Image: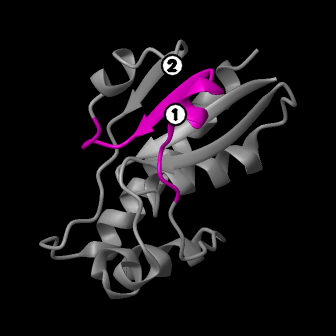
Amino acid sequence: MKKILFVCKHNVFRSRVAEILFKRMNKNRNYAASSAGLIEWNKKDLKRDQGYIAEKKILEKFGIKLKESSRGLNSSLLKDTDIIVIVADDVPPSLFKKEKIFNGRVIVWKTKDVKAGDKNKGKVAEKSIKYIQKKIGQFVKSLK
C-alpha cells in the first residue's frame, strides 16, 4: 500500500481538508492518506483564531466537519510516506527534498491560507476548499 501525506503549515485546515476529500473521492485501495503540519497547534489557539473559525463555518457548506486538533510532522511519518502533497503556499518543498529519511515524491499545490488580515475570511476559505477539491479530483484520477 502506498501512503500519501498531505502537509500544510499547522494541520488545522488545508491538509486536513485534502485528507478528508481524498478519503471521500479515492476508490483505489492501494493508496491511504493522512495529514500533518509543520507546526502543531493546541486547542486554545484554535478556538481563538478568527481564520479557523471562518474556515469551520465554510466547511459545513461542503459537509466537512473538523475536530479541533492538529498533528505535527515527525520522522516516523516521513519514513513511512511514499508521496507528500504540500497543500500550502507557505511550506517550502526543499524541506522534504533534503530529508534523508524521506525517499518519496513531493507534489506542491500552492493553496492560500486564511490570514488574520483578510477582509473576507469566508470567501478566502471557500476558494481554498474549491481549489483543494479540484486538485484532489485530478490527483485521484492520476493514481494507478
- Give the answer, above or below, for where 141 lies relative to 114: above
User: Which residue is identified by label 2?
Assistant: 101
Please name the residue shown 69% across and 25% down the image: 141
Q: Nearer the viewer, residue 25 or 43?
A: 43
Q: Classify residue 21 as left or right of residue 122.
A: right
**Label 2 crowd bin: few (<14), some (14–19), many (20+), radius 10 Å:** some
Amino acid type, mark 1: Ser
The magenta stretch spans which residues?
71-91
Amino acid type, mark 2: Ile
Separation (CA) of disc 1 from disc 2: 7 Å
Q: Classify residue 50 as left or right of residue 47.
A: left
> Where in the figure is residue 72, as x and y percent of width and height?
47, 52
Q: Earlier in the sequence, mark 1 or mark 2?
A: 1
User: Which residue is identified by label 1?
Assistant: 75
**Disc on res. 22:** none
Q: Nearer the viewer, residue 86 or 44?
A: 44
Rendered image quadrant of residue 50 = bottom left
Q: How is the image coloured?
A: one colour
Rendered image quadrant of residue 122 = bottom left
